[in-house]
Amino acid sequence: MKHLRSLTAVAEVARSGSIRRAAERLNITPSALTRQIQDIEYELGTPIFERLAQGMRLNAAGELLARHIRDQAADLDRVRSQIADLSGVRRGHVALACSQAFVTRMIPEEVETYRAQFPQVAFTVQVRDHVQAVAALVSFEADLALVLQPPPSAELHALYAGRQSLCALMRASHPLAAQDGPVRLRDCLAHALALPDRSLAIRHHIEHALARRGVELRATVESGSLEFLRNVVLREDVVSFQVPSGIPDDLRLRSRLIDTRDLEPMSVVLAQLRGRLLPVAASKFADQLAAHLNHQAALTA
């Protein structure tokens, strides 16, 4: 594993932009770290860093090496997980990037279910919007991404693709809560609105539908936090918009599906980086999560 330690040194210098800061994090002297970098450049026959007044920056050759380093680290995680499986003990780590809509109920429940069977598997869950979640896969910060309306990307390999209708969310005493069944979007717009901001896919989805009708959204409150918006709904007679997976079981809240004549369902995608071999733990969790999403879709079909 000695060569991996050298590659780790390259990654740390690239991340920190400084030999001195990287050496402190790696707990070695700056001169020793400089020799490691020079040895790698000698073996490759080319510099991999630009030496600038403000620090160290990867050049084109260095960027290629950095991608190789990320691939090597991912492969090593996968092999370690497989070796642990040989002994009958499922160890490992799952890194998941997901939209806010799934962190209230779905992901905590699925992590609990998985860890009940494999308690030695650790999880990192990053809350990311649809664009940032894809970037987390590409940079190997995440093994899996569960997102609403991901942007088209040749680097995504979908493990599950489905749809969820958007809901109008209000408190139980709101005038719209007195009726059952789907609600028309125009009826929602007649009330004060607590809207997701433009960092979230839900806002783009609604604005795109209204733009075709020449209707402009006017927010009383807007936020990039769905949890904050739910708390506003509990306190005022406002209407917000969320997907069913993001709405907690709370008798104080009421949700009604938006009529599909006004708003098409949003796409839900569970994906990994195309061509990447996932660690065993991440692969098994992906299977479990995809099965849950398929079951949930069948119940609402």
Image (cartoon, grey):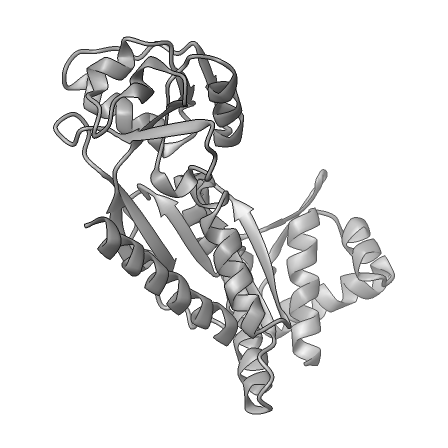
In-front residue for pair 230/54 = 230
- Could you tell me residue 234's position as x and y percent? 50, 21
State which quadrant residue 217 falls in: top left
Q: Residue furthest right?
A: 29
- Could you tell me residue 232's position as x and y percent? 51, 19
Q: Is residue 222 shown above or below 4?
A: above
Residue drawn where x is 37% and y is 18% of the image: 239
Residue drawn where x is 42% and y is 37% of the image: 247
Horizontal placement of 218 versus 104: left or right?
A: left
Q: Residue furthest left?
A: 261
State which quadrant residue 54 falls in: top right
Horizontal placement of 146 versus 1: left or right?
A: left
The answer to whether residue 60 is visible is: no
- Could you tell me residue 233's position as x and y percent? 46, 20
Residue drawn where x is 53% and y is 60% of the image: 111
Residue drawn where x is 44% and y is 42% of the image: 99
Q: Is residue 201 shown above or below 58?
A: above
**Count of numbered badges drawn on the protein:** 0
In-front residue for pair 23/186 = 186
In-front residue for pair 169/250 = 250
Q: Is residue 192 shown above or below 279?
A: above
- Could you tell me residue 20's position as x and y percent? 81, 51
